[in-house]
Image (cartoon, rainbow, N blue to C red):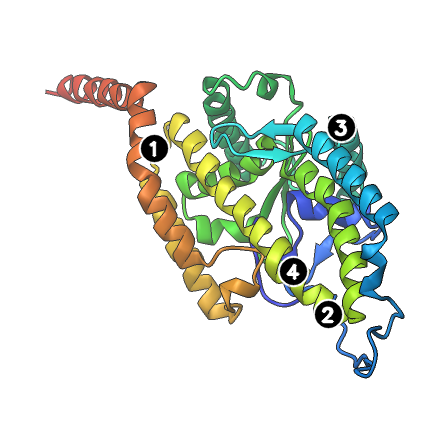
Amino acid sequence: MFRFGPNLNFSLSSRVLNNTFNRNPNPSFSRFDSQFRFYATYKRFNNQKNSTGFSLEFFKDPKIQKRILVGGALFAAFYVYNLDQAPISNRRRCIWIPKFVELKLADITYRQILHLYDGKFLPDNHPYTRKIESIMKKIIKGIVRDENGEAKEIDWKVHVIHDPNVPPNAFVLPGGKIFVFTTIFPIAKNDDGLATILSHETAHQLARHTSENLSKKPLYSLLGIILYTITGSSFINDLFLKSIFLMPASREMETEADYIGLMIMSEGCFKIDEALKFWKRFKEFEDRSGVRSFEFLETHPASETRYGNIERWLPEARERQESVGCYSNQFLNFSSFNHGFDSFF
């Protein structure tokens, strides 16, 4: 996912679906969530109860302790049963949302986006649309090489949106619906820059980050209720959940999408060094737009962090390219060029 300035961030992949899940008909997001509620709460310091009337004596009841233990055991069993392993990165996480629910939510979001940008889609025969389709074919080829057979079964569909008023963006919905805004082309510069974006967004769906996010929502809600009964402060609860759970988890998924995206980009035989150049240009765009902030308070890693990660992963990506014959193909193409060039003499 990519982030932009206040009121300029179009929700990508899982955040688009989360928006639908919360029944918000507009799939656009502000970069800064307005969920912090800055108001005072008062506590009584001369007794053991907080402003909610809750007492910690509640947990000393043996019956309550037994219920907590039973509930904890059931939750642990549920968690282990639903453990899932992400492709390529092999990270294990709990996903209990069925795929059909994820696809249904994606379909609802897809229809909303089609309605929202009606009249702004480039035709299928437009050079930009054909370019994105050509890049996606190579990306999908890289996914299939990683033995992900599901990529063949997905009904991939490319949509290119021309709206100069929308900030640069691209995203992929579950089910293979791809959206690219023409405003991203100047930052991408070339096919390999576009492949960097599209591989990253495809990686989000390959890793099922949408379902992972939705699977965590009930847990975060439960933690919020427990914290509120203890502290009586919505602001403290929001700050704690965001800084300790929500934002680090989101940054972890973004980093994972960067890694998976680079690997499938490499197996698609793109120029992976262009990924570094893209993130440099993206950082320059951030600086010009004035959207920089502390990484600790962000759902995305800073561009410098991403750049460093990709630089560290490049040797592995080059090994993948060598293993699938990308360099030999380049040599064959060069030999063919020389043969054709010699025919002029």
- Indicate which disc, 3 or 1, sits on the residue closer to the N terminus: 3
Quadrant for residue 100, please give it: top right
Q: Is residue 170 visible?
A: yes
Q: Residues within 10 Å of mark 4 (few under 14, many from 20)?
A: many
- Dot 4 falls on a residue whose secondary structure is helix
Amino acid residing under circle 1? Ala
- Residue 336 in the image: state x and y as whole percent: 23, 17
Q: Residue at x 52, y 63 (%)?
A: 296
Q: CA distance from mark 3 to mark 1?
A: 32 Å
Q: Which residue is mark 4?
A: 242
Q: CA distance from mark 4 to mark 1?
A: 33 Å
Q: Nearer the viewer, mark 2 or mark 1?
A: 2
Q: Which residue is mark 2?
A: 36
Q: Which residue is mark 3?
A: 98
Quadrant for residue 328, please give it: top left
Q: CA distance from mark 2 to mark 3?
A: 31 Å
